[in-house]
Amino acid sequence: MVAMPDAAPARTPAAPPSWTARHCVRALLAASLMLASTAGCARQGTDVTPGQAFENPGNAQLAAAVTGGDETLARELIAAGANPNALDEQGQPLLQWAMKRGDRDAFRLLLALGADPAQGNRDGRTALHLAAMGKSEGWLDALLEHGMSPDTPNTVTGATPLYDALRADSEDNIDVLLRAGARLDVADRNGTTPLHQAALVKDSAAVLRFLEGGADPRATDRTGATFQDYLYRGDPKLLNAATRRHLEKIDAWLQAKGIAVQPRG
């Protein structure tokens, strides 16, 4: 009688990649998100690897999940303790990290997952401040539509996003914020108002616009200075024609209100 060879053991079908990733994540979470390395569990198809920007393995996996567009996995991670407001190694929240990558899908997903856009980075700037400084369209509108106040304060200085739009010389972002109702009667922790800030950055067009929009020309900062103390001083011949016209209109506006015009030059 001829012995028959043993039958080859049945092969277990390979688990789908998404299941494999979730199984790996659950193993990490079971270890309280404290494993030193999670390289073997990195999801394929993303350019974020755990530990690249977020020290905590669970937060690193969350970054990978949102950049990979895996909402189910992201929700599992958050339910297990990953933080949608985690700070990366540069001190910026995950939402701002996604914005700087230009990843609008991850940005929208993080908002849907409960990331707080009013959280400040290391310098106190919120997502709205970051958007006010940027050149890319859409970020400001998306955050305002999400419900952020145009007067959201910097968590360190108290300055509103309008200050950053002025520093970035972004007329478009100034327009967006003003249309959204940004106030001109606020001040940061140094008493600096948007009118002061416009004068500080020598934006004569914004100074005129703010005065005409109701900004208080007599408001003083912590040093006792009004916006006039920060307006251009020097030879008017060095100014371009547009700036000279703006300054002339500012002077005329002040005179019409009975406010003395400080000498320049």
Image (cartoon, grey):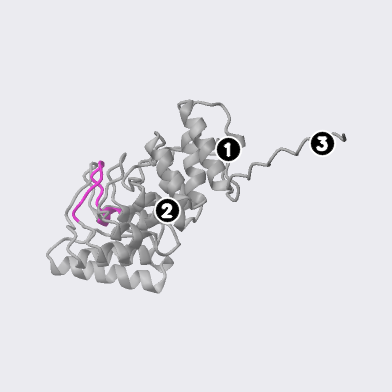
Label 1 packing within 10 angstroms: few (<14), some (14-19), many (20+): some
Image marks 3 and 2: residues in contact by CB distance under 8 Å:
no
The picture places residue 113, in percent across and down from the top left corner, at: 36, 48
- Residue at numbered disc 2: 107
The picture places residue 62, in percent across and down from the top left corner, at: 47, 42
Residue kind at label 3, given as amino acid type: Pro
Q: Which residues are magenta?
A: 185-197
The picture places residue 254, in percent across and down from the top left corner, at: 18, 65
Residue at (31%, 70%) from the top-left corner? 246
Q: Residue furthest right?
A: 2
* Distance from the alpha carbon under mark 3 to that under mark 2: 58 Å
- Give the position of the N terminus as an image quadrant: top right
Residue 41's disc number: 1
The picture places residue 9, in percent across and down from the top left corner, at: 71, 38
Work out whether 45 lies above or below 4. Answer: below
Residue at (57%, 49%) from the top-left corner? 46
Secondary element under disc 3, as helix, strand or loop, is loop
Residue 209 among magenta residues? no
